[in-house]
Image (spheres, grey):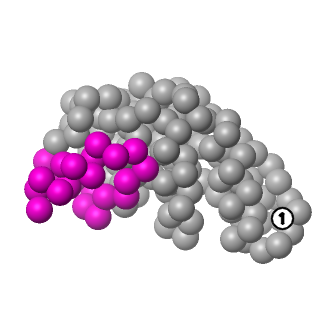
Amino acid sequence: MKSIAALLLLVPGTVLAQARPETYPPDTVLVVAPTNYPFAGIQISGGIPGAVVVESSLVQAFRIAKAEPNVTGVIDINLATDQAWETGRVVCYASSGEKRWEEKVFFNVGGGAERVAEKFTDKLAAKTRGKTCK
């Protein structure tokens, strides 16, 4: 089981079932996706070098980042689709918690929350592709 978890760490966009494997590869970036839109984490992490999706809260991700020397950053994805002004954003933080960069989108064509989340994720993925989070 440990070797399977270690192998999954090497595949960008992989969702880990456990929040903290024994070790992370150098320059790992933890990605925290909204629980109601897990596809966003996979899509965003696919374009960011070293990104690994973790099923945890943002607070838990920071605890891991501070305890694990190979983790260089944490990415938080927020898709607010149930408000009058829907927004989507991706924020990169250093493992210390310092904000490095942020990308936002505003989009409202209707079609329900799921459709808005998909459009936000597409636009955010384009904006963050190739960026680093160190």
Name the quarter where the C terminus is drawn.
Answer: top left
| Mark 1 Cα-neighbour bin, 10 Å: few <14, some 14–19, many ≥20 | few
Tell me, yes or no, whether the highlighted magenta stretch contains residue 13.
yes
The residue lying at 67 percent from left, 40 percent from top is: 126
- Residue 130: give x, y in percent of width and height: 55, 29
The residue lying at 53 percent from left, 39 percent from top is: 47
Q: Which residues are magenta?
A: 1-22
The residue lying at 16 percent from left, 42 percent from top is: 23
Name the quarter where the N terminus is drawn.
Answer: bottom left
Callout 1 amino acid: Ala
Tell me, yes or no, whether the highlighted magenta stretch contains residue 106.
no
- Residue 96: give x, y in percent of width and height: 36, 30
The residue lying at 31 percent from left, 58 percent from top is: 16
| Secondary structure type for disc 1 | loop
Up-down relation of residue 7 to residue 57 (above or below): above
In the displayed structure image, the side of residue 13 where residue 80 appears, left or right:
right
Up-down relation of residue 98 to residue 42 (above or below): above
Q: Which residue is mark 1?
A: 84
